[in-house]
Structure formats: structure tokens, C-alpha cells
Amino acid sequence: MSSSLKKILRSFQYAFNGMREVVRSELNFRIHLAAAVLIVLVCALLGVSKMEWLLIIACISIVMAMELINTAIEKLCDFVAPEKRPAIKIIKDLSAAAVLVAAIGALVVGLIIVLPKIIALL
């Protein structure tokens, strides 16, 4: 096996290690993961279009990626400054706000796609 292929495989291993860590240690990530599974099941049952699937998958990916970035920022802040510091609190609050913005956007997209289909069934 070539060294470049080994490097690529190693980078995937690092990424999967990160996924295991965030699932194990972060309640908010598990909540987002559960919400993602739920919306995928609902969309599958409602028969959403290909374009709607693309939007749903993009929203899920953005929220999950933002949660991973937020977790990385929080862990870095805790490592660099374990004591309470106002500047660190602002950094953590800003990264949490980024997740919130992405989650609200995903919720709105999900409601726009799913609500009319649910209403039509009723």
C-alpha cells in the first residue's frame, strides 16, 4: 500500500475517532442526531422529492458540522483556559450561536417541506 493511500486512510480513521468521541461525550450532538434520524424517517414516509431530499440532507449536514465545530472550539477553549474567563465565554457563546442559527434554519426548511405534506394527509 502506498504511503499516500495510508495517509488518506489514517485521516479517515481520525475523522471516525472524532465522530465516536462527539457521540460519546456530547448530549447536544446526540439530540441533533436523533432529530436527523426522525426527519429522515418522516421524509421517507411522506415521499419527499429529490430536491427536497437534497435540502434536508444539506441542512442535516450543516447542523451536524456546526455542532462538531462548536464542540472542537469548546474543547480547545477548555484546554487553553480551564479557568473562567469572560473572553472565553464569549467565544463559546458565539460558537453555540452558530449552531443555533443553523438549527433554526434547518427547522424552517424542514417545516416548509414537511408541514404541507402532513396537512394534505389530514
Image (cartoon, grey):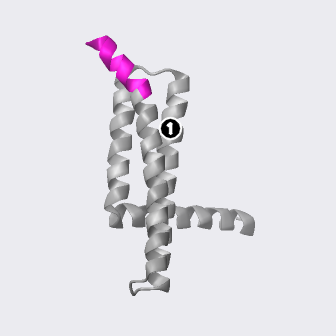
- Residue nearer the viewer, 7 or 17: 17
Report the span colored magenta. 112-122
Q: Would you call the spot at circle 1 few (<14 residues within 10 Å), some (14-19), or many (20 or more)?
A: some
- Residue nearer the viewer, 41 or 35: 35
- Residue positioned 43% across, 35% down in the render: 108
Residue placed farthest to the left in the image? 122
**Residue 102 in the image, given as x and y percentages of width and height:** 48, 47
Residue 23 on the magenta span: no
Q: Main secondary structure of the magenta part?
A: helix
- Residue positioned 45% across, 22% down in the render: 48
Q: For mark 1, give the secondary structure.
A: helix
Amino acid type at image mark 1: Ile
**Residue 106 in the image, given as x and y percentages of width and height:** 45, 40
In this rendering, the answer to whether 64 lies above or below 77 is above
Q: Which residue is mark 1?
A: 57
Residue 117 on the magenta span: yes
